Amino acid sequence: MKPYISLLLLLPISLLLLLHSSPATGHLDIVRKTCKKCSSGDPNVNYTLCVDSLNSIPKSHHASLKGLGVISTKLVLSKASPIKSKIKRLLKDDAAHHSSNTSARIRSCLKTCHELYSDSVPTLKDAARAIRARRYDDANVGLSSVVDAPGTCEDGFAEAKVASPLTEENREFFGRAVIALSITALLQEQGGGGGVGGH
Ligand SMILES: *[C@@H]1O[C@H](CO)[C@@H](O)[C@H](O)[C@H]1NC(C)=O
Ligand SMILES: *[C@@H]1O[C@H](CO)[C@@H](O)[C@H](O)[C@H]1NC(C)=O
């Protein structure tokens, strides 16, 4: 009698384990696996940030690599508006103060940064559309220019010899942009048709 009881107990337990583990690890895998590939292929990709940011979008767990490309691009896009708002606020604050040479230089840098981040919005929207349409080369071109924006913004302050009030924002934006670019590079390797071997 005893062996039968233990078998009967084991069966539902192993079934439960099977049901629980396979879909769960499967979904985690696409995010983790993709972030691992991206971070090993590009030292600028922060694995933790990649996993955390993709995990913040529940759809990621059911996404294809192409889906993750779109999601990661939208995550970059979601960072552009708050940065633009902060720059507007800084310009306003600065304009309220008396105009010194320093504030004139800061204002000029802020305006350049605002333009860079404004330009990134349509470029990111186009890149997301390009990924959906499997035009990965087009997406790469757009994302490559977006990846450069925060560095160009930051360099402006350095050249004007003033402290950047946007260092943290530029870092955050860059960190997310390189993830989207890196996922797009994986899609390019994989090939537009999703064929094995690629080019
Ligand atoms: C990577 O991202 C995590 C989470 O955002 C952050 O805590 C960590 O400092 C980052 N690491 C580097 C090297 O930037
Ligand atoms: C402000 O800038 C102008 C030209 O850019 C320069 O001639 C002037 O000496 C500067 N004033 C101060 C106080 O640095």
Image (cartoon, rainbow, N blue to C red):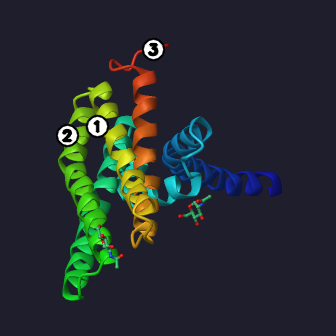
Disc 2 marks which residue? 126
Mark carried by residue 20: none
Residue drawn at x 33%, y 18% is 193
SS for tag 2?
Answer: helix
Residue 96 placed where, x, y %? 19, 87
Q: Quadrant of ligand 1?
A: bottom right
User: Label 3, label 1: how many angstroms apart (C-alpha)?
Assistant: 22 Å
Earlier along the polypeptide chain: callout 3 or callout 1?
A: 1
Disc 3 marks which residue? 198
Name the amino acid type tagged 2.
Asp
Name the amino acid type tagged 1.
Gly
Disc 1 marks which residue? 142
Left or right: residue 25 compared with residue 56: right
- Which of discs 3 and 1 lies nearer the camera? The answer is 1
Earlier along the polypeptide chain: callout 2 or callout 1?
A: 2
Residue 180 placed where, x, y %? 40, 44
Residue drawn at x 56%, y 52% is 46
The vertical placement of 143 against 119, above or below, is: above
Specify the farthest residue to the bottom: 97
The vertical placement of 167 against 121, above or below, is: below
Q: Quadrant of the N terminus?
A: bottom right
